[in-house]
Amino acid sequence: MDINNVRISIKKYLTNKPRNTAEISSWLSKNNAVSNYDVADILESDDSIVRIGVVRKSGMIDKKLPLSEWATKEWVRYHERSIK
């Protein structure tokens, strides 16, 4: 699958809720959608996907390869709290 189709697939996967990098990688592997791509690079290079946090579980975080949580900008806008 080419990089553009991978991006489109990831955006669809992130439509309903944020997912972390490991979940996205696993999902892509199960669907045979990606083999040699760096998932974090794909997510960071897409303007419609944003990093919304880092998963902080013991043994799950690495300073070189953080386990980030990702969402679409549309999901973030919809779930933003209004400040009054």
Image (cartoon, rainbow, N blue to C red):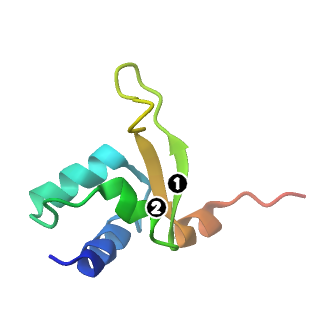
Q: Secondary structure at mark 1?
A: strand
Q: Above or below — where is 57 with respect to 14?
A: above
Foreground residue among 14 and 58: 58
The residue that label 2 is drawn on is 44
> Can you tell which of label 2 and label 1 is closer to the viewer?
2
The residue that label 1 is drawn on is 51
Quarter occupied by the C terminus:
bottom right
Q: Quadrant of residue 22?
A: top left
How far apart marks 2 and 1 lie (CA) works out to: 8 Å
Which residue appears at 45% of the width and 31% of the height? 63
Q: Above or below — where is 41 with respect to 74?
A: above
Which residue appears at 35% of the width and 48% of the height? 21
Which sits earlier in the primary sequence, circle 2 or circle 1?
2
| Kind of residue indicated by mark 2 | Glu
Disc 2 to disc 1: CB gap under 8 Å: yes
Number of residues whose C-alpha sits closer than 10 Å to that of mark 2, classed few (under 14), some (14–19) or many (20 or more): few
